[in-house]
Structures are given as C-alpha cells and as structure tokens.
Amino acid sequence: MDSNYCTFIGNLYCCPVGERLKDCPLNFNDNMSFEEKIWKFKKLAPVEKDALIEHHRKCANSRTINFFYK
C-alpha cells in the first residue's frame, strides 16, 4: 500500500480531531472492527482513497483552526 495511504489508516480507527461529524464519509464503518475497516479501505480504488484523504484534510484543518481561534 502506498505510504500516503498508510499514514491515513489511523483515521479509520477514530477521528484525530474529536468526534466524527455527520457528513464524515468514514461514518459508514463505525460498527466494523478495525481489521474490517482496513480491509475495506484497501479494496477502494485509489481515487476513492484520495477523496477520503482530501475530505479528512479539509475537515481537520477547519476544525483545528476553529478550535484554536475560538
């Protein structure tokens, strides 16, 4: 697996900036085991993985900025 994807794997376990938002595309897998989440992520097409990573990056940046500037 590409190293860019490997660094994202932890996000499958939990959101690093708090509780997942309702629009988080990873909400679908909250009832799966961590191993199942990894297996499902590995089966995604690269474009789907990239979309998840980009969504996470934008969301995490906005939530981190809001946290520090409240």
Image (tube, rainbow, N blue to C red):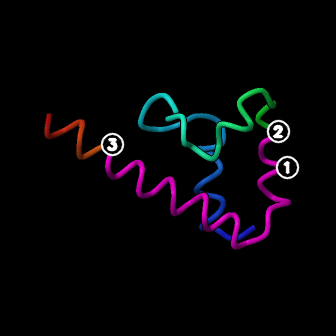
Looking at the picture, tell me which residue is in the foreground, 22 or 37. 22
Residue identifier under label 3 = 63
Which residue sits at x=73%, y=72%? 46
Q: Is residue 9 above or below residue 42?
A: above
Residue identifier under label 1 = 39
Q: Which mark is residue 26?
A: none
The stretch in magenta equals 36-62
Q: What is the C-alpha distance between the residues marked 3 and 1?
A: 28 Å
Q: Is residue 13 left or right of residue 23?
A: right
Q: What is the C-alpha distance between the residues marked 3 and 2?
A: 27 Å
Query: Tag 2 or tag 3, which sits nearer the N-term?
Result: 2
14 falls in the magenta region: no
- For the residues bearing labels 1 and 2, Cβ distance under 8 angstroms: yes
| Numbered label tally | 3
Question: Which residue type does callout 2 highlight?
Answer: Glu
Residue 18, percent from left and from top: 44, 30
Query: Tag 1 or tag 3, which sits nearer the N-term?
Result: 1
Kindly state the secondary structure of the residue where label 2 is placed: helix
Which residue sits at x=78%, y=42%? 37
